[in-house]
Image (cartoon, rainbow, N blue to C red):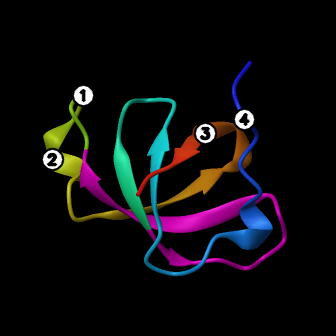
C-alpha cells in the first residue's frame, strides 16, 4: 500500500512525483490539505509541460522525492 502524502507539510521547493509519472516542484501551498501549485521539472508523457505550472490535487501525488 502506498504511503499517503500529507499536503499540509509540503513546503515550497519540495519535489514530488505524480501519478502521471511527472516530477514537479512545489511553488505554492495554500496548506488546505487538498492541493498545491507546482512546476513541472520533467514529464515523460508530455515534455512540453516542463517549466509550466499547474495545480495538483492530493490524489495526483504519489511520493515526496529527496
Identify the residue at image location x=74%, y=18%. 1
Task: Give the residue pinned by disc 1.
Answer: 45
Task: Give the residue pinned by disc 3.
Answer: 60
What is the magenta segment's predominant secondary structure? strand
Asked whether disc 2 touches disc 3, contact meaning CB atoms under 8 Å apart, the reply is no
Left-right relation of 21 to 47: right
Local crowd at mark 3 within 10 Å, few (<14), some, or many (≥20)? Answer: some
* Mark sitting on residue 48: 2
Local crowd at mark 1 within 10 Å, few (<14), some, or many (≥20)? Answer: few
Identify the residue at image location x=35%, y=40%. 22
Identify the residue at image location x=80%, y=58%. 34
* Mark sitting on residue 3: 4
Q: Earlier in the sequence, mark 4 or mark 2?
A: 4
Foreground residue among 16 and 49:
16
Q: Earlier in the sequence, mark 3 or mark 1?
A: 1
**Residue 41 coordinates in the image, percent (x, y):** 25, 57
Foreground residue among 61 and 48:
61
Amino acid at each position: 500500500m502506498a504511503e499517503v502524502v500529507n499536503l499540509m507539510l509540503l513546503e515550497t521547493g519540495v519535489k514530488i512525483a505524480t501519478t502521471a509519472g511527472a516530477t514537479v516542484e512545489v511553488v505554492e501551498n495554500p496548506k488546505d490539505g487538498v492541493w498545491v501549485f507546482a512546476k513541472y521539472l520533467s514529464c515523460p508523457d508530455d515534455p512540453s509541460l516542463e517549466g509550466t505550472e499547474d495545480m495538483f490535487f492530493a490524489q495526483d501525488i504519489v511520493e515526496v522525492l529527496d
